[in-house]
Image (spheres, helix red, strand yellow):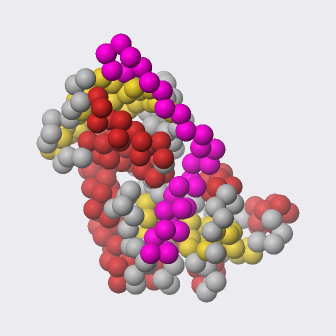
Amino acid sequence: MTSWGVIGIGRIGQNFIKNLLEVPTAKLYAVASKSALALDRFSQHHPDILTYDSYEKIIEDPQIDALYIALISDSHYQYAKMALEKHIPVICIVPSVKNVKEFDEMIEISQKNKTLYLEGIRTRFMPCYHQLKQDALSIGKIQEIHCNVNEKQLDDNYWLYYSIAFAMGIIDSTLIDVDLFNDDEVEVIELLFRNQCKLVIDRSSLSYSSCKIVGANGTIILSDYTSPQEYTIFINDVSKERRFDIKNDLVPVIEAVELCRNKGLLEHPDMTIDQTRQIIDIADNIRREMKYE
């Protein structure tokens, strides 16, 4: 049984805890928050869970087997490094680092201490995404993946990381060019890959975070590519729907950590170190070019 600690018990932390309770091999052991009010409210609902009023204290607890960091992105780097130095496996919500340099520092500590560090891009671990990758082979050579971003759904710069991570798992090629189009009403990012497939990230859309995958012989439409649970395949005049009943979309991420701990792995095949590094590198270059915070 893995004893989990959670840093941050706001909306994201509470959602993770809800997911954690669905994994039979995991248990919530402790949480940390700097808000006395938040800790008091949490204890009323979870009186058996240990609480800490500082992030450093929970990291110092020797009973913690794994740690989820649910803070604003700028705080991840500091506390993730501290946890890895204590040999505590870490999951962060993305983006947990600002650039490749910081990511490489994390991986250096991870490998030195033989401790897992995982970017929690949930899409890559979900059963629906695994099936989608197989179904994408049926529509012929992929020509374009078009992601429509709903920024109310994806806070901060999550939209950028999720879009790149989603597409690169399907395209399976190296990036060769990036074009940015930005005016008062439209913001579009186009990424061209060596196999001539194009990823288009459209931030001007008012739709939910939907996606269209265009192949030589058909298309696939998703209503939500950040937490995919259904999609439709169109080939000629025939359509086929795929549906997955996933109520707690972080469960596959938690199960991935459990698997890595049990097998002594420092990376997961659904989100390898090299893949994560590529995603962070591309996103960092785009953020600097577009002057995002």
- Rendered position, 129 above or below 254: above
Q: Is residue 151 visible?
A: no
Residue 150 lies in the magenta stretch: no
Task: Name the side, left or right, on which 209 lies relative to 235.
Answer: right
The quarter of the picture where residue 273 lies is bottom left
Q: Give the mark count.
A: 0
Residue shown at the point (33%, 58%) measured from the top left = 276
- Rendered position, 209 above or below 260: above
Residue shown at the point (34%, 73%) measured from the top left = 107
Task: Name the side, left or right, on which 118 lies relative to 235.
Answer: right
- Rendered position, 124 above or below 143: below
In this view, the residue in front, 232 or 52, is 232
Task: Name the side, left or right, on which 191 lies relative to 116.
Answer: left
Residue 285 in the image: x percent, y percent? 26, 50
* Quadrant including the N terminus: bottom right
Residue shown at the point (55%, 61%) measured from the top left = 254
Residue 44 in the image: x percent, y percent? 85, 63
The residue stretch that appears in magenta: 234-263
The residue lying furthest to the bottom in this view is 62
In this view, the residue in front, 235 or 65, is 235
Residue shown at the point (30%, 70%) measured from the top left = 104
Residue 166 in the image: x percent, y percent? 37, 43
Residue 13 in the image: x percent, y percent? 64, 58
